[in-house]
């Protein structure tokens, strides 16, 4: 029989502190059944979408999945595809060009950024940081900010707008963007060095470099002691979790080796841990988010697939042209087809994240059941640069408080911040307004 253990139990070793997944023994320690913690995440993709292949034609249940959303077919019952949401703060409203900078900075704030490329940046507090301010103290990390393209906090990146606007969706205060981590190795270190001293971490890294040890080698004895206290089901769950951590660690190491082999000395200019394979980079970051949620290191995360206005090419899906350049398609059918390929590639990575979340059993369901994951862009069509009817998907049932499996069409010009208020309510944070909100979003439940 499981002996009760605290939800905050960690496995410790030299410079390592490995948080644990939810176990039956933890529920026994609580003395009574309690709902699993709710998590929220926000995923941003740049440059809008090919709208013809994004929005379902039917609303309600059994909606059609357009070409771009086909990779999500196996998750259709876990999704709300939402059409009609708007970010008015992404429009010029007298400020002229700069749509990409506005679309990123407004994405989670609902506020229009002040047009400046120097001092005086200002937009609003983002929904993730509102949640973190109220609930972040319950976990070792109040929130986790991830990305795949490095950002800049100063300089002009879009028609007089600071680069901080284009590369940040998470804002702690109206004038404080939170930097995102783009290096999987550094994210791994951050997640698994909680509460340890810097000298211990340096010593562990030295031993790893010398003896090629895994982080699990440093916590192995603690894991064995804990295992003796657990029942068979919990031991199996712990073993599966540890194996998942080891797999991520091995993938990072192999990608680092491959990058050096492929690029030679030039690889030294790139921080170790950043894969040259963009798809693998996205998936590794998704794995980090899943692990952080699974071990309750944080319940709040943001993930920028790329910065606003990104002109990355997508040769891996046969698109050598830059994404931003293609987004100005002028209704050219060849360019539109390539944009749809890029959109589908992004959705495939989203599907990977959902697959990882759904594969983890947690109490009365899966980790995905206990999440609210927003995926989308702050621009509707990259050619028009418009900010109404944004391409937005909400995944996860939020502990049974969202009725998924539907295409929900809301009235045009409904502020996206209304969705955020409804999500915050479910997260246990009740505020009257944020950004340009006009109320709660109806239709999340039937």
Image (spheres, helix red, strand yellow):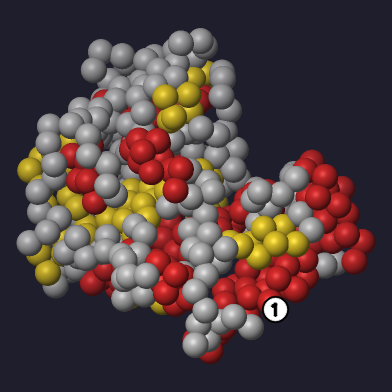
Answer above or below: position of 109 versus 337: above
Q: Please indicate whether residue 297 sits to the left or right of residue 239 in the image.
A: left
Report x, y in % for residue 370. Answer: 33, 64
Residue that appears at 52% across and 79% down: 3
Residue that appears at 31% across and 71% down: 33
Residue that sits furthest to the top in the current view = 119
Report x, y in % for residue 65. Answer: 23, 67
Residue that appears at 31% across and 66% down: 34
The answer to whether residue 158 is seen in the rendering is: no
Residue on which the image places disc 1? 224
Kindly indicate the quadrant of the structure image that contains residue 346.
Answer: bottom left
Q: Please indicate whether residue 161 sits to the left or right of residue 224 in the image.
A: left
Of residues 424 and 160, the one nearer the viewer is: 424
Report x, y in % for residue 366. Answer: 36, 73
Kindly indicate the quadrant of the structure image that contains residue 268.
Answer: top right
The answer to whether residue 227 is seen in the rendering is: yes
Answer above or below: position of 226 versus 256: below
Q: Please indicate whether residue 90 sits to the left or right of residue 359 in the image.
A: left
Q: Quadrant of the C terminus?
A: bottom left
Of residues 200 and 243, the one nearer the viewer is: 200
Q: Residues within 10 Å of mark 1 (few under 14, many from 20)?
A: few
Report x, y in % for residue 236. Answer: 55, 85
Circle 1 SS class: helix
Residue that appears at 56% across and 82% down: 230
Answer above or below: position of 260 versus 162: below
Of residues 27 and 281, the one nearer the viewer is: 27
Of residues 259 and 136, the one nearer the viewer is: 136
């Amino acid at each position: 029989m499981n002996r009760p253990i605290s939800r905050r139990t960690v496995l410790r070793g030299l410079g390592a502190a490995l948080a644990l997944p939810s176990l039956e023994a933890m529920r026994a320690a609580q003395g009574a059944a309690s709902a699993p913690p709710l998590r929220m995440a926000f995923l941003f993709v740049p440059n809008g979408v090919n709208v013809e292949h994004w929005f379902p034609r039917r609303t309600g249940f059994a909606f059609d999945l357009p070409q771009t959303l086909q990779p999500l077919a196996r998750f259709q019952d876990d999704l709300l595809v939402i059409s009609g949401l708007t970010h008015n703060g992404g429009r010029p409203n007298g400020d002229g060009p700069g749509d990409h900078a506005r679309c990123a900075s407004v994405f989670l704030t609902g506020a229009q950024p002040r047009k400046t490329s120097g001092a005086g940046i200002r937009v609003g507090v983002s929904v993730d940081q509102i949640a973190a301010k109220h609930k972040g103290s319950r976990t070792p990390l109040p929130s986790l900010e991830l990305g795949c393209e490095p950002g800049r906090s100063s300089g002009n990146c879009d028609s007089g707008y600071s680069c901080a606007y284009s590369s940040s969706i998470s804002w702690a205060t109206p004038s404080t963007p939170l930097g995102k981590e783009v290096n999987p190795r550094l994210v791994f270190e951050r997640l698994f060095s909680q509460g340890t001293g810097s000298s211990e971490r340096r010593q562990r890294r030295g031993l790893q470099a010398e003896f090629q040890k895994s982080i699990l080698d440093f916590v192995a004895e603690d894991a064995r002691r804990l295992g003796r206290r657990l029942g068979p089901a919990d031991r199996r769950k712990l073993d599966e979790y540890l194996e998942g951590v080891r797999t991520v660690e091995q993938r990072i190491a192999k990608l680092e080796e491959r990058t050096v082999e492929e690029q030679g000395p030039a690889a030294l200019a790139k921080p170790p841990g950043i894969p040259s394979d963009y798809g693998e980079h996205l998936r590794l970051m998704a794995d980090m988010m899943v692990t952080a949620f699974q071990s309750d290191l944080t319940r709040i995360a943001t993930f920028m697939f790329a910065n606003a206005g990104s002109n990355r090419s997508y040769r891996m899906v046969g698109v050598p042209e830059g994404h931003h350049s293609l987004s100005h398609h002028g209704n050219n059918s060849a360019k539109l087809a390539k944009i749809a390929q890029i959109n589908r590639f992004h959705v495939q990575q989203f599907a990977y994240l959902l697959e990882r979340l759904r594969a983890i059993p947690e109490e009365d369901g899966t980790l995905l059941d206990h999440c609210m994951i927003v995926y989308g862009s702050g621009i509707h069509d990259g050619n028009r640069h418009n900010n109404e009817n944004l391409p937005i998907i909400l995944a996860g049932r939020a502990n049974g408080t969202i009725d998924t499996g539907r295409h929900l069409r809301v009235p045009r010009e409904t502020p996206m911040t209304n969705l955020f208020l409804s999500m915050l309510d479910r997260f246990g944070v009740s505020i009257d307004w944020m950004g340009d909100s006009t109320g709660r979003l109806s239709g999340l439940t039937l």
